[in-house]
Image (cartoon, helix red, strand yellow):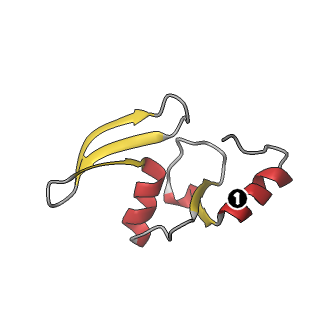
Amino acid sequence: MQILKTFIHKVKGYRMVSYLDDDGNAHLDYEHRLNWKLKYHYVPKGYIIHHIDGNKTNNAISNLMLMTPEEHTRHHDSLGLGLRK
């Protein structure tokens, strides 16, 4: 994998990564999702990668948690944060 560019998404605030895979195909992905895939090989369809500390740019594996959308919503609701669409 060759990283081409990283940047912060202007609206969502997540770090994005533009890269070439081993076959030379270009991809654009959220850094937290890419880090999860590099460690665990995939993100199950329909699952969310949650930032434990709430910092959208802290993409360390130790700060990431796999959740269903329902679990994610309940978690944010329990903290009184709600979720932005």
Determine the image quadrant of residue 69: bottom right
Left or right of 11? Residue 23 is left
Front residue of 66 and 45: 45
Determine the image quadrant of residue 85: top right
Tell me the element at label 1.
helix
Q: In this view, does 4 lie above or below 39?
A: above
Q: In which quarter of the image is the N terminus?
A: bottom left
Instruction: Tell me the residue at 22%/57% (across/down).
Output: 21
Instruction: Tell me the residue at 50%/50% (across/down).
Output: 59
Residue 47 on image: x %, y %: 57, 65
Query: Hey, what amino acid is under mark 1?
Result: His
**Furthest-top residue in view?**
10
Left or right of 68? Residue 60 is left
Q: In this view, does 64 lie above or below 81?
A: below
Q: How crowded is mark 1: few (under 14 residues within 10 Å), some or many (20 or more)?
A: some
Left or right of 54? Residue 36 is left
Residue 44 on image: x %, y %: 50, 71
Residue 74 on image: x %, y %: 79, 59
Disc 1 designates what residue? 72
Determine the image quadrant of residue 67: bottom right
Residue 33 on image: x %, y %: 46, 56
**Furthest-left residue in view?**
23
Instruction: Tell me the residue at 66%/49% (across/down).
Output: 53
Instruction: Tell me the residue at 35%/37% (across/down).
Output: 6
